[in-house]
Image (cartoon, grey):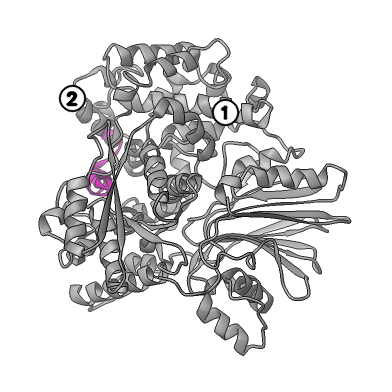
Amino acid sequence: MSTGNEEEGMCGITGYVSTENNDESYETIECMTSCLSHRGPDDRGTQTFSGSPFIALGHTRLSIIDLSTTGHQPMPNQDASLWIVFNGEIYNYRELRVDLKNRGHCFRGTSDTEVLLHMFEEWGESCLTKLDGMFAFAIWDTRRQVLFLARDRLGEKPLFYTTWGNGFAFGSELKAILAGRFPINEGIDPVSVSNYFSFMTTPNPSSIIRSIRQLPPAHFLSYDAIQRTQRIRAYWDISDWKPEEGRSQNSYLEELKQLLGQSVTRRLVADVPVGALLSGGVDSSVVTSHMKRAIPSEELHTFTVLFENSDEYNEGPFARRIASHIGSTHHELPVRLSLVDDLESMVWYWDEPFAVSSAVPIYYIARAAREHVKVILTGDGGDEVFAGYGRYFKDRIIAPVSGSFWRLFSPVSGAHGLRNLPRGLRRILRLLSALSQGPDGGYVYLLSLFSEREKAFLFTGEMQQILHKDQDRTVAVLGEHYERFPGNGGLNRRIYADLKLSLVDEMLAKVDRMTMAAGLEARVPILAHKLVEFAAKLPERLKLNGRTGKYLLKKHAEEIMPRDLVYRPKHGLTVPVGEWLRGDLQDLAWDVLSAPDAHYTPFLDRSAVKRMLGWHQKGRGDWGNHLWAVLVFELWLRVTTHRLGRSIATDSYLG
């Protein structure tokens, strides 16, 4: 899998522009960059430009290809008129390099970073449409005094930014901006808190901090340091969702195999060991099979993690069968969960409050795999791209018949009533609640962790007053994406919004943060943009056929893996947080959430939190996931306050 070329690998990037230049300016970029040392343990660099405006760039590097120092960043072009900091991989950089050389460009090395720099020289912002890869980067144009930022199409790599009166700052993670101590409002955003307790993440383009934003996927931002103005534009979207007339299922299947093979092959370039995470599920099995086809004469290493103190998400037997079928060298890595010892570290790496509990096993999987490889291919993205989630089938049944009529049967119990009922009855009443809220409201209700009624129980009176101004705030998160599709139904409408939100803020954020914490690079072949564009144009029956999701992908999987594994019940990383909170985490949860100096009190009602703890311990319903979200929120406030050396949660931030 070695090519002898240079490529920067996964990194962390930081920077800021300010009209003020003082003795602390150089220290600021060092503090920002230090916050991202886990994203790039192999190399680190900063570059400052004195004058007005003052600009500083920072970079940390995880070396993947060409382990020398020639890829050091920040990197200038030949005349130092452009400087770049880059996080990601450009998979088609070699073809682009040939094109640029034919146009007269000269190269000092062979890295994808240098190619990207020359592309910006040649084509400006339109260079983004030519890239195949995952990336977040910033380019400082010294002549025009303009800072240019961009993020990849699907949002595999993160990018945060903020502005104030005379400046602009950015970073791969929110904590890097906070470390800069800029004159911005560092208050918690109440609407983002509400969305967090609905979706378990903070939906882009907002962040948990009021004045810090996320650059959305497939967007660029241009900041004029002289005029102090910014411009944000989209450079890509899935515009064509119509299937091609007259195409057969077999023709779609052949194109799928071709695109998958191309995507996987491009993601194998590395001068360090490359492996695959193999769960025995469809997505990872298909990716691994194409890896073996791409390198038939080389040894392919696959990894499955076996959790020593839990049988909940051990998929060893399934992965073992696939590995034997494909012919990979398979490793079963034993891991013991140490939640009490590791939870605070995980919360710091999550960067924002992040209640997606499957991030916990991903953290341990990444650490275990990193002992053997530096790059890993995963099967992530298949459920969003090819409609693999069960909620798509439920929505197809619910959406056409939902409406106000069902409010007659909607539960009228208190905030905790539903969870204290038998499981079967609880499911029926939950379905009735979804039906009563209309097509979009019902879908969001099924997606949400806390319902609006439960959030009203959880939040303080002051929080409720602030949020009362926007009663439909949770549905509105998806609304702007739904507006691109007329009508209230349709599978593609749901998939489109999920690609823009849950894929980015949940799945990809989880993979990026946890693999970066371990110094491991994760590559996601199913999210190649050509493959996503292809999937968008599939007839709906080839995505969701009856109750079978990922229909066409599974037809392909039948060719490369045992059929009983293709159609076994969907497993995923099911995490028993309810058991944890009655077991290993019980004392920690009580101590943290009952503490008199708890940081959450400006937002959450202390008595409500204690009642939830009591109900869960007494078996009055399963409040595990809800309490997990509260615990993560409190730990995030504590850890961030401690590591940054100042509080970011006070009552004044609700004003």
> In terms of image quadrants, where is residue 239?
bottom left
Q: What amino acid is labelled 1 in the image?
A: Val
Q: Note whether residue 468 is visible.
A: no
Which circle, 2 or 1, is nearer the viewer? 1
Q: Which residue is mark 2?
A: 425
User: What residue do we see at 28% from left, 68% from top?
Assistant: 292
Name the image quarter holding the C terminus.
Answer: top right
198 left or right, relative to 616: right
Query: Of the numbered discs in the image, which one, if any, rests on residue 238?
Result: none
Q: Which residue is mark 1?
A: 639
Q: Which sits in the foreground, 449 or 482?
A: 449
Find the distance from the CA under tag 2 to the CA under tag 1: 40 Å
First in sequence: mark 2 vs mark 1 = 2
Residue 451: percent from the left, percent from the top? Answer: 38, 29
Residue 207: percent from the left, percent from the top? Answer: 57, 41
CB-based contact (under 8 Å), mark 2 and mark 1: no
Q: Is residue 221 above or below residue 623?
A: below
| Residue 609 among magenta residues | no
Q: What amino acid is labelled 2 in the image?
A: Leu
User: What residue do we see at 23% from left, 53% from top?
Assistant: 281
Magenta highlight range: 389-406
Residue 545: percent from the left, percent from the top? Answer: 18, 58
> In terms of image quadrants, where is residue 626?
top left
**Crowding near the residue tagged with mark 1, few <14, some 14–19, many ≥20 C-alpha atoms within 10 Å:** some
Q: Is residue 332 above or below residue 632?
A: below
**Crowding near the residue tagged with mark 2, few <14, some 14–19, many ≥20 C-alpha atoms within 10 Å:** few
Q: Note whether residue 629 is visible.
A: yes
Element assignment for label 1: helix
